[in-house]
Image (cartoon, rainbow, N blue to C red):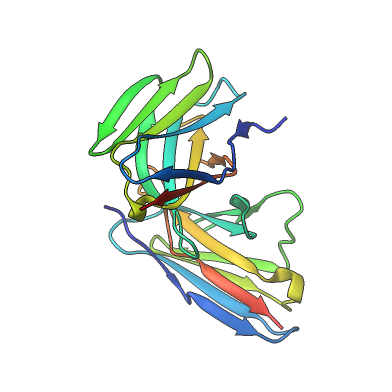
Amino acid sequence: GAVVSQHPSRVICKSGTSVKIECRSLDFQATTMFWYRQFPKQSLMLMATSNEGSKATYEQGVEKDKFLINHASLTLSTLTVTSAHPEDSSFYICSGAGGGNSPLHFGNGTRLTVT
Amino acid sequence: QKEVEQDPGPLSVPEGAIVSLNCTYSNSAFQYFMWYRQYSRKGPELLMYTYSSGNKEDGRFTAQVDKSSKYISLFIRDSQPSDSATYLCAMSATTGGGNKLTFGTGTQLKVEL
């Protein structure tokens, strides 16, 4: 089945620094990738839709200047959390699909802790 | 009212039991329905993917969709402790590839020995 690889799995950073999370589709080309965040015992909340070669589309309430998304190729999308603050601590998950009728497959998530 | 409603549980069952997980939704445009399993601190894993109404079976898992009632179910037969996880329903109005999913809140399942 389709495999989405996400790195790092866990990161701890100091307040004010930036963190980059990578999401790769290993065995398919993903024209579109999605970025979610998930708080403990809550469902996934869509942050943004990333389209290869174009600007990402952000959901209402998500700061595009804070959460920078780059989708430079059909197999790689990155999310950079800039000037991270403790309230940005969360579980970030990416997903992608191979097009057509194929469903979304998810990465294993990145647990971000900002101290 | 949320677009997708799902009982968060927790649901605790003995090993070997039949588990029934359910979601209701309000958007009649939803046509594609998915069930994901999420273990703690992991990303969701696709279990079942169905289109429109009907049943789909895969091993111990059966997914049912009743569009007239806007109700979907996931049945797990002969449940095992390894099935203990959070189960998320998800749906979309158009085909999966480049389209956003709407998720339920997830049901936490615990299968006890």
Where does the image place residue A88, in percent across and percent down from the top left?
Answer: 71, 70
Query: Residue at coordinates 48% horizontally, 17% vertically from top-left?
Result: B67
Q: Where's the N terminus of chain B, which quadrant?
A: top right
Residue A69 placement: quadrant: bottom right
Image: B84 above or below B92: below
Image: B28 above or below B18: above
Where does the image place residue B108, in percent across and percent down from the top left?
Answer: 52, 48
Where does the image place residue B90, in percent across and percent down from the top left?
Answer: 50, 39
- Given residues A29 and A2, the one toward you in this image is A2
Query: Residue at coordinates 39% horizontally, 42% vertically from top-left?
Result: A103
From the viewer's perspective, tell me whether residue B56 is left or right of residue A92: left
- Residue pushed farthest top? B68
Is there any visible trace of residue A87 in the rendered image?
yes
Query: Residue at coordinates 28% horizontally, 40% vertically from top-left?
Result: B78
Q: Count every numbered label the image shows and give the total.
A: 0
Where does the image place residue A2, in percent across and percent down from the top left?
Answer: 30, 54
- Given residues B21 and A89, the one toward you in this image is B21
Residue A15 placement: quadrant: bottom right
From the viewer's perspective, tell me whether residue B83 is left or right of residue B44: left
Is there any visible trace of residue A55 in the rendered image?
no
Image: A38 above or below A99: below
From the viewer's perspective, tell me whether residue B22 is left or right of residue A114: left
Image: A2 above or below B100: below
